[in-house]
Every structure is written in C-alpha cells, then in structure tokens.
Image: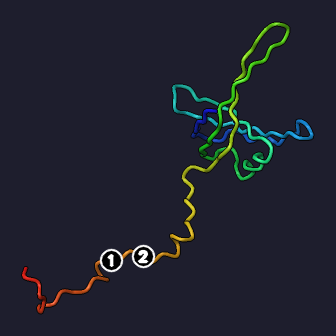
Amino acid sequence: MASVTINGTVKAVGKTQQISDKFSKRELVITETGGQFPQHIPVEFTQGDTSMLDPFAPGDEVSVTCYVNGREWTRDGATKYFLSLKGNRIEKIGAAPQARPSAASAPPPPSMADMPQASEEDDLPF
C-alpha cells in the first residue's frame, strides 16, 4: 500500500460517524495551495484514529501521512473504481518539537570559556 504526505491548511474536521457496530470514521479536509488552484483533499480517519483529529481546527497548518486505497465496485454489470486516502498520522506544521528526555538531561557542550587557559610555561614547541 502506497503512502503519501500532504501539507496544507485544515478546511474542515468532520464529526465521528458510527457506520456499524464495529466501524467508525471521521473526515478531515485539507486545502493544499501548491498548484494553480487550491485543492480540497478529503482524508478519512477510521476506528481509534478518529480521536487523532480532536486537537485540530480549521485554519491549522498540518502535515498528514495517509495510505492510498483503490477499490473496484461492480453493479448492474458496470464497474467503477474508487480512490480514498486513509489517514494514519497528523501533526501541526511549525509546532515546537518535543524535547527527548535524554537530550533534556544531557549537559551542554563545552564552550571556549570552559577550556583551560594557556600559560607562558607551556611545554609545547610551537
């Protein structure tokens, strides 16, 4: 299954829809302005991933990673093909990265002020 990353602005965050006892979905619409015309791209989040959209609102700049799904459907002898994007990750663009605990507890690198000062009694020949 192919994955893509889409960067853009949140246009709409839908409500969670309970499709059946075992299936729920929620739609996010992202506006991407990279081309000649704005593109409004719907991305579907399903099951437990629907709650990932809770902190997002229209106007937020986001990066969404999603899987590309293609399906075939035949009815009355006519075959149609459908394409959908299933979101599996979303993050705000420009948000401060969270510090890792190991990086926060590490001492700062030494500076020139931490280096020993040279004296005139140096043994070095140069």
- Residue 84's tag is none
The residue sitting at 56% across, 49% down in the picture is: 93
Closest to the observer: 112 or 62? Answer: 112
Residue 12: % across, % down: 72, 39
* Identity of the residue drawn at 62% across and 50% down: 91
Coordinates of residue 53 in the picture (x, y in percent) = 73, 47
Q: Quadrant of residue 30?
A: top right
Mark 1, secondary structure of its residue: loop
Residue at x 7%, y 79% (from the top left corner): 126
Amino acid carrying mark 1 in the image: Ser
Residue 124 versus residue 38: which sits nearer the camera? 124
* Residue 1 higher or lower than 48, as above or below: above
Quadrant of residue 124 within the rendered picture: bottom left
Q: Mark 2 is on which residue type?
A: Pro
Which residue sits at x=58%, y=29%? 38
Specify the farthest residue to the bottom: 121
In this figure, which residue is indicated by the disc labeled 2?
Answer: 108
The answer to whether the residues at label 1 and label 2 have Cβ atoms under 8 Å apart is yes
* Residue 17 placement: quadrant: top right
User: Could you say where residue 100 lies in the image, as x and y percent from the top left?
Assistant: 55, 66
> Residue at label 1?
111
